[in-house]
Amino acid sequence: MKKTIQSVFAIVAAALIGALLYYSTLLPRKQAPADITVDITPAKIERGRYLAVNVLQCIDCHSERDWTLYGGPPMEPLGAGRKCLDRTTRAAGVNVGERVFPGKMCIRNITQDDKTGIGAWTDGEIIRAVREGVGREGQGLFPIMPYFIYRNVADEDIQAVIAYLRTLPAVGSIQPERKVDFPMSAFIKLLPEPLYEKVPLPDRSDRIAYGQYLSKIARCEFCHSPRAPRSMVPIEGRAFGGGMPFFLNGRTMYTMNLTPHQTGLGAWSEQQFVNRFKRHAQPGPADPKNNTLMNWSAFAGMSEDDLRILYEFFMSLPAVPYVEEPI
């Protein structure tokens, strides 16, 4: 009996040591950044600007936002980073309840400054960070950077984004190093995942497939698909059904139902859908207490055809009734 107990303890100890070694030496899961130099052409720069500003909204996240205007458009200098999130900041995310940010993290400078931006990064290092969640030094990135969504960005499109980022004027903007509380600090290392396969760009002539692609990389699916409380797992059968709570300036707001249900887009025409975006091309004044997290002016810059493709995709979805999820 004594030997059996000793054997069990030995197995458990070995397992714990093995898990610790795996965690400390092999996480986050990563591969070497691709040895790639993006061919910078006017066409790539323009496509990359469109994606970074109007679809992926890299500029939106990595710039300070003007909350006196509707949708909080980004302010100059574009891409120079924004103020830190800390323990006094209530998370502006889904199903967060009364939680605040677990530590301190500053949204980094993505201009071409060599010291405080990404000017010294290789193209492969930037691509790995954006799509796989691994920083230049091999560290796991905090998932407020939606690399788990951007891994779906096609190879052709991510290279266009890099071409555009290379045109951002260098701005010196020193941001403090992040300090994330346990257990989130440990959890971050579990999330990155290498992307080994190529990611093709869907054929634009297949408007449903291309619409699905746009809806994923523009985060429509993520923001408008209900998830269980305090979870990142979508509720089965509720994709794009809306009702997800987001928090801004003491107010809780809920995302719209994007399915063809009558509580969603069921009564909307295609032109009404397009007009809903285009009317915010020039953002007007807004009371910060009644503003919205969605940067309408950025999405208003999407081409009319892309907006029509999105509408066609949304209308192809199963109709899901709108339900507001608990906070």
Image (tube, grey):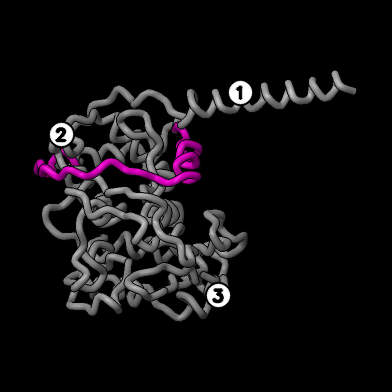
**Residue appearing at x 20%, y 69% in the figure:** 281
| Nearest to viewer (mark 1 / mark 3) | 1
Question: Which range of residues does the magenta coloring cover?
Answer: 165-194
Q: Amino acid at mark 3?
A: Val
Q: Is residue 183 a member of the stretch shown in magenta?
A: yes
Q: Write the residue at 32% across / 67% down.
A: 293
Q: Is residue 83 above or below residue 116?
A: below
Residue drawn at the location 34% of the way across and 70% of the way down: 248
Tag 1 and tag 3, C-beta contact below 8 Å: no
Q: Nearer the viewer, residue 50 or 180?
A: 180
The crowd level at tag 2 (other Cα within 10 Å; few <14, some 14-19, many 20+) is some
* Numbered disc 1: secondary structure: helix
Element type at mark 2: loop
Distance from Cα at disc 1 to Cα at disc 3: 45 Å
Farthest-out residue, front? 2
Q: Earlier in the sequence, mark 1 or mark 3?
A: 1
Identify the residue under disc 1. Answer: 18
Residue under numbered circle 2: 115
SS at circle 3: loop
Asked which quadrant contains residue 220, the reply is: bottom left
User: Looking at the picture, how far across and down is residue 250, in whole percent?
Assistant: 36, 74
Which residue is disc 3 drawn over? 323
